[in-house]
Image (tube, rainbow, N blue to C red):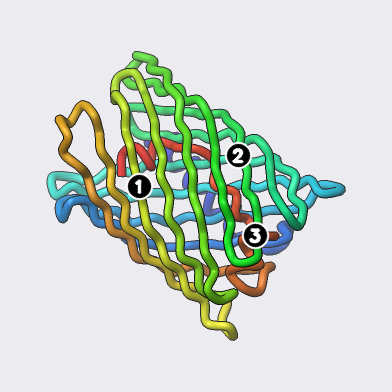
Amino acid sequence: MKKLLVASAAAAALFAAAPAFAGAGQVDLSYSNVEDEVDVINLGGAAVTGIGGDWNIQGDATVHRVDTGFGAMNFTDAALHLFKRTDGFAAGVYLDTSDVSMASAWGLGVEGAKYFDQATISGSLGMNTIDMMGSDADGWNASLGATYFPTDNIALGASVSYADIDFIDSVTSWGLSAEFKPETMPVSFFAGYANQDIASFSGDDVTTWTLGLRWNFGSGSLKERDRSGASMKGGINMGDLLF
């Protein structure tokens, strides 16, 4: 719990200071419902800044409050990205970490995106290590996503990912998302649906709905944020595996 509080305080300080030092970023608040049984409140954010030439560094973190109906728990996901971005593509590496009361995890991998006139294709490939009550588990993950912009301020997304972790077994996920930003406002509104197929659950799928709002700074439209903002997604972290 002490580690979580420290991480949460650090994330809050990062979000508060981000507009002062970063080129662009966002802070978001969302609600997720898992199988009509678990409620999750998510407070997250990301910031990016150029470090010379076409190279950029991005930091992001999310604090989750999970209510199962029998009790509540908190955990934090965070990531750091180093990447090169031009008008046509982005490519780089990421390092992520997660902290829960009885477990911690970290991941390392490569990520990238290709920009088209009205669409972006993105993907990642990485490895994971999870430490749960003194037992280590290793694995790997891969993801592929696409975002279509019918207008500069409407983003429609689809994604698929796969993770294979020793004690969790394989997890195949797919998701759909939509985001809208009024042209004259810095705030955007988003919704998402995700489905997980966990092999060790004998074929039972886990579904999640998410609704939220996002404050954007340093970029005008959603399309501009995708091409020049804090838009790198990284790999599959513990939050993606759990919810």
- How far is disc 1 from disc 3 in space, using C-alphas? 22 Å
- How far is disc 2 from disc 1 in space, using C-alphas? 18 Å
Looking at the rendered structure, the kind of residue marked 1 is: Trp
The x, y position of residue 225, in whole percent, is 63, 64
Q: Report the residue marked by disc 3.
A: 116
Q: Residues within 10 Å of mark 2 (few under 14, many from 20)?
A: many
Q: Residues within 10 Å of mark 3 (few under 14, many from 20)?
A: few
Q: Report the residue marked by disc 1.
A: 174
Residue at 37 percent across and 36 percent down: it is 1
| Closer-to-camera residue (232/80) | 232
- How far is disc 2 from disc 3 in space, using C-alphas? 17 Å
The x, y position of residue 148, in whole percent, is 52, 64
Q: Is residue 125 left or right of residue 137?
A: right
> Going from the N terminus, do you reach mark 2 or mark 1 first?
2
Looking at the rendered structure, the kind of residue marked 3 is: Phe
> Going from the N terminus, do you reach mark 1 or mark 3 first?
3
Q: Secondary structure at mark 1?
A: strand
> Going from the N terminus, do you reach mark 2 or mark 3 first?
2
Q: How many marks?
A: 3
Q: Secondary structure at mark 2?
A: strand
Q: Report the residue marked by disc 2.
A: 111
Looking at the rendered structure, the kind of residue marked 2 is: Glu
